[in-house]
Amino acid sequence: EAQVTQNPRYLITVTGKKLTVTCSQNMNHEYMSWYRQDPGLGLRQIYYSMNVEVTDKGDVPEGYKVSRKEKRNFPLILESPSPNQTSLYFCASRYRGPYEQFFGPGTRLTVL
Amino acid sequence: DAKTTQPPSMDCAEGRAANLPCNHSTISGNEYVYWYRQIHSQGPQYIIHGLKNNETNEMASLIITEDRKSSTLILPHATLRDTAVYYCIVRVGGYQKVTFGTGTKLQVIP
């Protein structure tokens, strides 16, 4: 089944403890993105990648890192999480060109 | 990417057509219009997209005005399962950076 998977789905952590949220897709998509969603603010893009080793900042990249060492994986790294990074996170992927994005199920992160 | 404007909320009676408008008055010639929806806090789901012509698929129809400054998503026979937040976005086909906005919360009423 074609899908985007994220792990973990739920995470509660404390300020400053490094964490990684994994994202994997099995559709051989070139493009991948990370979004965060907060009440009243809609979906905001954090980082995106157009291919292996090619990444760029979205609208809200501060406090996040990404890497794209393999085509199928695009992990989101929070080196020193803070409470303002408490949010619902989505990973998405698509083919190059005017194609639709496929979204993962989301990761609900709480930073205490 | 061009900005889009959508009404924050709309109601629709079950079984009737739901017409969701989107304004994208600054759209450029190579930008597509995409529609997604999000049910509760699930991952957004793609509905339809188009460049100039009207489009139809098994889920919905997309009507784009001739000047391309606005569009309407039509759900022909709304059901309770269509209750969701609907997002209209515009982007260049090959471009990756995208702005989603806050969408329209559609409530389908029995």
Image: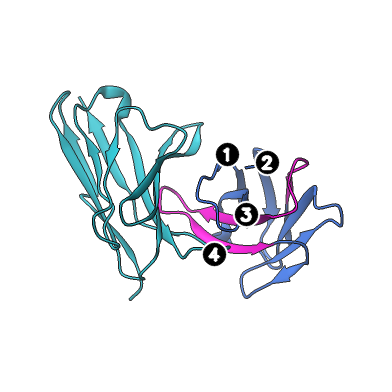
Q: In the figure, B11 relative to A39: above or below? A: below
- Which residue carries the number 1 mark? B101
Q: Which stretch appears magenta?
A: B21-50
Q: Is residue B74 left or right of residue A109?
A: right
Q: Say which residue label 2 marks.
A: B4
Asked if the residue at tag 3 contacts the one at tag 1, i.e. Cβ–Cβ closer than 8 Å, the answer is: no
Q: Are marks 4 and 1 on the same chain?
A: no
> Which residue: 68% across, 41% down?
B4
- Which chain does tag 2 point to? B
Give percent across and percent down for residue A84: 32, 23
Chain for disc number 1: B
The residue under the point 27% across, 23% down is A83
Residue underneath mark 3: B108
Whether marks 2 and 4 lie on the same chain: no
The alpha-carbon separation of the residues under discs 2 and 4 comes to: 19 Å
Label 4, secondary structure: give it.
loop
Which chain is assigned blue?
A: B
